[in-house]
Image (tube, rainbow, N blue to C red):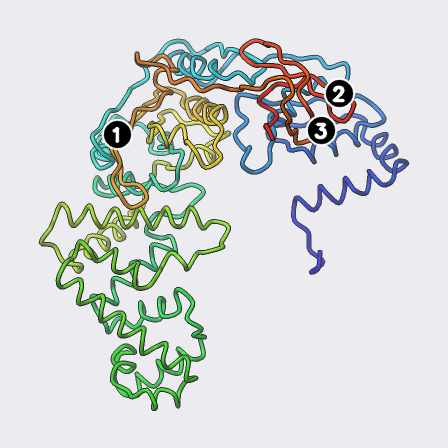
Amino acid sequence: MENNLVDFDDLIALTYRLLDENEDLARATSQKYRYIMVDEYQDTNELQLKLLQKLCSAHNNLCVVGDDDQSIYGWRGAHIRNIMEFDQDFNGTSVFKLEENYRSREPILKVANSLIEHNRSRLGKKLIPTRGSGEDVTILNSNDENEEARKIASKVAKLLDSGIKAEDIAVLYRVNVLSRSIEEGLNRAGIAYKLVGGLRFYDRAEIKDLISYIRVITNFHDDFSFKRIVNKPKRGLGKASVDKIELAAHANESSIFDYIEKISLSDLEFLVKNKNAKTLKKFVKDIQSVAKVVAESTYNFIDVLEETFHLKNIYAGMPDEAEKILNMDEFYGLFRDFVKNSPEASLDEFLNELTLQSEQDQVEGESIYMMSIHASKGLEFDHIFIIGMEEGFLPLIGDGSDLEEERRLGYVSFTRAKETLTLSHVGSRFYKGRRSDLQKSRFFNEAGLCEGSLIVEKNTAFKKGDLVRHKIFGTGRVTGVSKSGREFKLNINFAGTKRDILASFVERL
């Protein structure tokens, strides 16, 4: 607003405010637009609902289309209660269930139906196959992510050799960082791929920064990499200061690093501010110090690098800080795995390996697709591979995750497949900088794909007298609890107004 600019959220908020503050305008607008249709209604948020109510203030000619089982955007404000309680928001509602499915073969729909039936907060439907039977869903079991990548690359290669078009194949994952190992597996097999909705692992800024640090540590004279990292994390060095140093170094037929190392501090202070001169001198000494550690122990290099330069601080406070740090940890884990498998290898050999990956990334031609499950919504492919089918990845556990939304993500990913569906899990992965043993996802059992003890989490433990909060109605007190199918229904007193609401739509205070 300060810059006379608005984003999409502002457009909705300002429109709602305009209609809310001008009742006559709201009614006139509603009378102008006599018939309203909304698609993907399960992805609407509270403000969009309120705006819709204003637009329907003069009539009830509203038709919405949506699938409560595909509500997967809770993290960005979408609320499933909008579709679940539509009949409470708009009187005289008629519901039509569209259950015939024209996309997926029967075995795929069978596992999708079985999985989503474990959710309590749903209107309830069962997809009916119209395309007949097909291949059973395949479970791919691997020891680690590298074996998983080899197996998937092999299966993809067989599909391509059989005449399947690359564009009809996709690899999906819940967490973006899992793409790295599959990218490498496809690169080694010479299979071209397109990463949808994100950068290739080695093209991400945080990974380029790490590689630049390693390049400078192995080659002090790499001016290109030196300039990239000299102010990361920020050291108060502006572009003008770096440009002055570079010009002086070139005039002396020296690399930037050599020039800073050999020039006296007093002479350096003639070029840049005193503080910047000292910062540059310290930076060069720190690089030399880390380089000595590498000569003694390659395995400890990553720990010393992070302790010396605090590279994760580069992204502190950024909206995507958590994802960038996950990517950095993945890279650290990749390095440790490289050293573990090749204990005598040098940093140069590690860089050569990365360079090979980068060159293979440029393979052109038809490509298979790789993307997150969120990015796949609305798309369809003949052959789908889903990786990371482990507890902690799918379903994601912790970090504010919602098990029912995770189950809906599984449902969405399954139903992207038309002909075949392959679900992959591993015994261990490198994650957050270390290797962790993993447990097979509970979704295999819930989808009826294997036997095992079902992991049950209580959906609610509310009792009479509990104080709760609802996103729309605010704070209230539970006056009664009753069973409603697989869910619990709470009678809640909101400042004198009593409402019956499903337990999954409130939180205890």
Nearer the camera: disc 2 or disc 3: 3
Query: Which badge, 3 or 1, comes first in the chain's sequence?
Result: 1
Seen in the picture, residue 217 relative to 1 is either above or below; the reply is below
Cα separation, mark 1 vs mark 2, equals 47 Å
Type of the residue with mark 2: Phe
x, y percent for residue 311? 36, 59
Most foreground residue, 453 or 136: 453
> In the rendered image, which residue does mark 3 sit on?
473
Q: Which quadrant holds residue 491? A: top right
Type of the residue with mark 1: Val
- The secondary element bearing badge 1 is classed as strand
* Residue visible at 17% across and 67% down in the picture: 292
Quarter holding the N terminus is: bottom right
Pointer 2 local density, CA inside 10 Å: few below 14, some 14–19, many at least 20: few
* Residue visible at 38% across and 52% down in the picture: 204
Most foreground residue, 83 or 475: 475
> In the rendered image, which residue does mark 1 sit on?
426
- The secondary element bearing badge 3 is classed as loop
Nearer the camera: disc 3 or disc 1: 3
Query: In the displayed structure, does residue 103 sit left or right of residue 179?
Result: right
Residue farthest toward the left in the current orientation of the protein: 344
* Residue visible at 16% across and 50% down in the picture: 339
Query: Which badge, 2 or 3, comes first in the chain's sequence?
Result: 2
Most foreground residue, 72 or 284: 284
Q: Which quadrant holds residue 78? A: top right
Quarter holding the C terminus is: top right
